[in-house]
Structures are given as C-alpha cells and as structure tokens.
Image: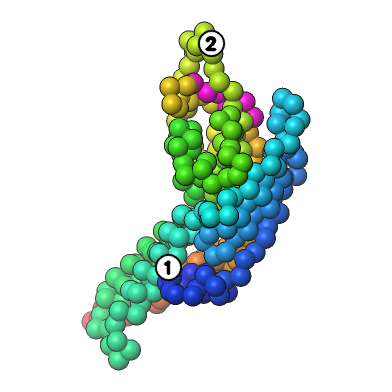
Amino acid sequence: KWKLRFSMPSPGLEGQLKQENFILGSSTMDQVKGVLTLQGEALTQADINIKVAKSSQVMHFAFRDDKQWKLQQIQDARNHVNQALQLLSSRDESYHFKTGAEVNKLMDAVMLQLSRARNRLTTPASMTLPELAASGLMKMFTPPMPGDVMVNFYINLSKLCLTVYQLHVLQPNTTKNFKSAGSSVLHNPGAMFEYSNTKFEVSHVHKVECVVPWLNDTLVFFTISLQLCQQLKDKISVFSSFWNYRPF
C-alpha cells in the first residue's frame, strides 16, 4: 500500500488507491468535529461542523462535489522518494562501482532526497494569515466559508491536522495597537492581520487531528532506509581504512 501511494503517478493509479475516512477529534474540546476522506495525496471530501463561540450555533461545511484538495506535503515527499529511486536505478545492473568514494557520493545523494521527503512530513509549512485567507482552500466549501472563519489542513508526522480560526473585525478606532502577525504553522488567539483593506484579529483557534496509519509506516521506512544507507557508508569507511593501511 505504501509503495502505491509513493510511486510515480500513472494512469489509473488513483483508482487503485481506496478512499479512507478519518474522524477528526481532540481530547480537550468539541467545538470542531469532522470527517475527512483521503485518497493518496488528495483530500477528496471534508465534512466539518464548527460551533460558533459567540452563539453556540453549529455551522456545517463540506467540499464542493467538483473540488478536491491536494496535500502538497505528501506530493513533495513522494517526488523526493522518486528522485531517490531514480538515482538508485540510473545505473545498469551489471555496473561495477570502481571506488568507495563513488558509492558514498551516491549514498549522500539518496540520503539527501530521503531526508527531504521525511522533512516534508515532519515540518509543516509556515503561512501568514493573509496567505491563508487568499488560499484556494477557502473556495473549496459549500456553503462558502463566511469571512470570519478560516481553515487550514496540514500533515504533522503521522497526523492529518485541521486548524479552524474564528476572527473578528477590528474597528478603525481600535487599531492603534495593530501589529501584523508573522508566518506560523499555528497562529494564536490575538494574532492580527490585514486582508482586503480590513483588519482582523483571531478570537478563537481550534485544532483537531486524526492519525493516518500509512503515514506512520512511511516515516518508519524513511528512518530504516536512512540507517541502511549510513551503514553502507560506515562499512565502506572501514574497508577504505583497511585498503589504505600499509604495514610498513
């Protein structure tokens, strides 16, 4: 299954990957609940209920039928894995390495791609709040997201995370202490930003998540693969010392 999800895209591949449903949850709050449908690197459906802080009214949103959201982190990780595989298969099977340095150079290149792949899953991208407001993700839902709610999906290790930001508009007479927030994976209540000539402040932040088992498997495979590459390099280092040793 892991190989299917991390192989090169090919016709019919999406059909081979079954859709998986994940229930979003949190141990500390129930203001946001939802079910996400994941197929490979694509979120094909999101069904989200958000309890509004002020009124306790529950808002319901779902992806439009014609929309799906590609998770860039999985896409990027897969691309790095494929670059590593291409490096390993770039030589004919009958090829003989001439020096230990040649093997080390190949292992360094492979390990770089595997490390980058792992880092894409362990390090979500930082975003500013205006970037989030302008994201195509805001246009995915029916009914459309109101102007005082923003959402973001990202991968963190083996978890698929949803963050919901509830906002309020800062009135012109209250903006003397306005300071625009920087870039972050998770913004805190009180963070301020300007978008479309309107100043906003984050009033509430809700984060829910679900564990995706095959992402956990993927991270384990990355660790094992990097260890095997390093072990090969260590063996070459030992043999190189032996070959270079002259007992006289």
Left or right: residue 61 versus residue 69 is right
Residue extending farthest top: 173
Q: Residue at x 39, y 74 (%)?
A: 85
Q: Nearer the viewer, residue 247 or 99?
A: 99
Left or right: residue 30 versus residue 2 is right
The local crowd at label 1, few if under 14, some if 14 to 19, many if 20 or more residues have their Cα within 10 Å, is many
Amino acid type of the residue that numbered disc 1 sits on in the rendered structure: Val
Secondary structure at numbered mark 1: helix
Residue position for label 1: 81
Give the main secondary structure, helix, strand or loop, of the magenta stretch.
strand
> Does residue 103 lie above or below 52 as drawn?
below
Residue position for label 2: 174
- Find residue 239 and report its image quarter: bottom left
Q: Position of residue 74 (x, y in %)?
A: 49, 59
Q: Write down the region rendered in magenta.
A: 199-204
- Find residue 15 and report its image quarter: bottom right
Q: Is residue 211 magenta?
A: no
Q: Nearer the viewer, residue 38 or 233?
A: 38
Q: Position of residue 145 (x, y in %)?
A: 58, 37
Q: Residue at x 64, y 29 (%)?
A: 204
The answer to whether one can see residue 100 in this image is no
Secondary structure at numbered mark 2: helix
